[in-house]
Amino acid sequence: MSAQVDDASAAPTPDARPARPRRRARRVLLGVLALLLLVVAALAWLAYRGAGAVDALRDAQDALADVTAQDGALDGSESLAALEASLPALQDATARAEERTDDPVWRAAEHVPWLGDQLTAVRAVSLSLDEVAARALPATVQAGALLTGDGLRADDGRIDLAAVQDVAAPVADAAGVARTAHERVARLDRTDLVGLLDDAVGDVDDALTELAATLDGASDVTRLLPPLLGADGPRTYLVLALNSAELRTSGGIVGAVLELRVDDGRVSLVRQVAARDVAVADEPVLALSDAELAILGTPLGRYMQNASGSPDFPRTAAIATALWEADGGDPVDGVIATDPVTVRLVLRATGPLPGPGGKAIRGSTFLQKALRDVYLEVDDDAQADAYFAAVAATVLGAVGSGTGDAEELVRAAARSVDERRVRIWSAHPDEQAVLARSTIGGAFLSGGAPQAVGVFLDDATTAKLDYDLTSEVTVEELECSGPSPTATVRIDLAYDPPADVATWRDSVLGIRPHLLPRGWLDTRVTVYGPVGGQVGALAQDEGFVGVPLQEQGREVRTTAVVLAPGQETTLRVTVPVVDGVVDVWTTPTLGAPGAVLARCVAHS
């Protein structure tokens, strides 16, 4: 008997198939669901933290608005008090924003295309603002307290250098924090940012740019002021008092020269001389470049009055000190130049001071008196120059003795520096290295501003008529796109003297009868391009004018502009836009500052 095998019972039925593939599919499905849940949770987490960060940043913006509402500048005790009062709220808001964005999930999401750009920008802004609020602004309050009230003035009237030294390190640290914060925001790729975020990042970038520059300047001041004012021993300086009645590149001819001595913060006047009384050199005391010879000729290096004709203040200082020493003066530790507008601002802080002939010197009338009336009241320019020198000495003596409101004096100094009306050069190389990279050093050709454009005015009438010349330099047609962006610099000049100008005495009019009718004005306009950049032709009204020159890697255009009484004219020149900025250094005049800045709004 044989056994039979049921083949059907050995074959698997549909219900008896292996479970392994189904279990694998279930695991994949569960994994996908888990991943989706994780993504949803991450997005929800990001939304939660992002909303908190945005709310915190809005609170920070409100706190900052409380400060900027105080005239937008921390240049007085009221603004300083506003900052100090708003600082806790600002610090709380920026700390919350930074905490919400300092998160592993947030950082991981920064690698996601497009979304990551938005998150990176928010985190960078939050971190930068928090660092500034926590570490930079408190030092600003500390330094500001020194500069307001009588914080800088010792009981005996001298400048308290120890107080300056105490804030030097905190201010330097604050400047470093602000610089790092600015660099972090400036490095952001804003190409794909949504509009509102891009605008916000741009606003923060602009604010941090200004703050970093301000604190860098404050750091330089607190570091340099003690040695400059004799903390390490007595110093001697030449002060060039510029006379804007006859323009030169730096703001006016040198009207008077004062020799100062400073020792441990105490300032004293050694002597004063009219610039015309410094001996004229037979030959230029320094070799002059072709551009210098073309613009001002050999008088630049022979007459003290013309030393201010260089656009580079270290060059002006070198010429002035060489002329001073050639006339028997002692070597000096530095040179300072300032213009009549600065004197007017100082007079507002000191109040009326006794002037020559017993007549008070007042801020409200100083410019007209010193730059116009005195030339019509005296018989020759030597008497007018003597008046100018005496006034400069009186004002300087008052400041050195502690006369006037200290806070107003600091405000006057800050405004004058900001408008490029004050220049300083030091014979000490370590100090000069710092000055050369700052605007107060005025090192247009030799310093750290190769990207800057120069627009400078020099009187070519040898007259005292520039009190009636109005000048304005502006930037228009700012093109920010393309491989070679450009802008147009516009120079407006208007000459409006009194109707009887032709009757004034000859030396006031700078008579050149073979060239100019009486009372007409001849002004040389010189434009310097950035180093390595191309400058377009110089256009005046409907035509083209100017002579092309070269100076230390810069293209130069120069022309003479002759104006009859009541006449005005406009010049234009095309210049490169460098890194989204047009930075114009120009001659400070009675009504216009020595700096014009235009920035591409959308530049990133």
Image (cartoon, rainbow, N blue to C red):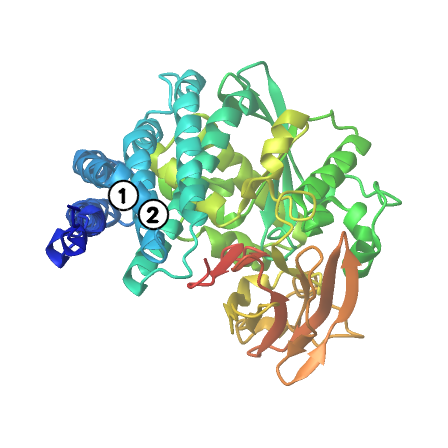
Q: Name the residue under label 2.
A: 110
Q: In this view, which residue lies farthest toward the left?
A: 15
**91 or 593: nearer the eye?**
91
Residue 515, placed above or below residue 527: below
Tell me the quarter of the image containing the C terminus.
Answer: bottom left
Q: Residue at x 75, y 54 (%)?
A: 553
Whether the residues at callouts 2 and 1 have beta carbons within 8 Å, the answer is yes
| Identity, as a three-letter code, of the amino acid under mark 1 | Trp
In this rendering, would 566 be left or right of 514?
A: left
Q: Is mark 1 on a helix, strand or loop?
A: helix
Q: Name the residue under label 1.
A: 106
In this rendering, would 49 be left or right of 581?
A: left
Measuring from the top left, give residue 124's x and y in whole percent. Answer: 34, 44
**372 or 424: nearer the eye?**
424
Measuring from the top left, give residue 123's x and y in whole percent. Answer: 31, 44
Q: Which residue is drawn at 42% across and 63% down?
A: 601
Residue 244, placed above or below residue 284: below
Quarter of the rendering containing residue 388: top right
Q: In this view, which residue lies farthest toward the bottom?
A: 542
